Amino acid sequence: MATRCNIVIKRGEDEIIIYRHWDGKPTVTGVELLKICQDSNYDIFGIIQSMARDGQYELTQYKHGDAEYEYTIDIERKDIGAIQILDGIWIKSDEFGFS
């Protein structure tokens, strides 16, 4: 079964919402997002361009209700985190499970 996730990219009051249908766990999507953000130095256009090239991310107007995880990328703070929606557990980027 797919592990879905929403990704919210925030810059000030503005938000862009991205949806991913497969592999939404922090050990996959979390690690990928962290690399994308670090490689682009948290540049919003670089992040979106990398996601668009990947083909697994879908720009959307709303958060999908079937997501198991929600990631927040804060452009101004250069920070990323995730929450496991069902349990309400906040996961920091250094806990995404990569070495």
Image (spheres, rainbow, N blue to C red):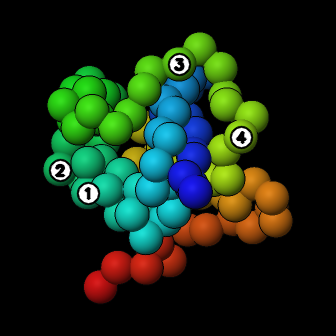
The mark lying in front, picked from 1 and 3, is: 3
Identify which amino acid the numbered label 4 is placed on: Asp
Identify which amino acid the numbered label 1 is placed on: Lys
Residue at 30% x, 42% y is: 42
Residue at 26% x, 27% y is: 52
SS class, disc 1: helix
Question: Which mark identifies residue 15?
Answer: none
Which of 36 and 69 lies nearest the eye of the viewer? 69
Q: Mark 3: give few (<14), some (14-19) or many (20+) Cα within 10 Å.
A: few
Q: Position of residue 18 (x, y in %)?
A: 49, 30
Give the residue pinned by disc 1.
Answer: 35
Identify which amino acid the numbered label 2 is placed on: Asp
Alpha carbons under labels 1 and 2: distance apart: 6 Å
SS class, disc 4: loop
Give the residue pinned by disc 3.
Answer: 60
- Indicate the quadrant containing the C terminus: top left, top right, bottom left or bottom right: bottom left
Which of 54 and 7 lies nearest the eye of the viewer? 54
Give the residue pinned by disc 2.
Answer: 39
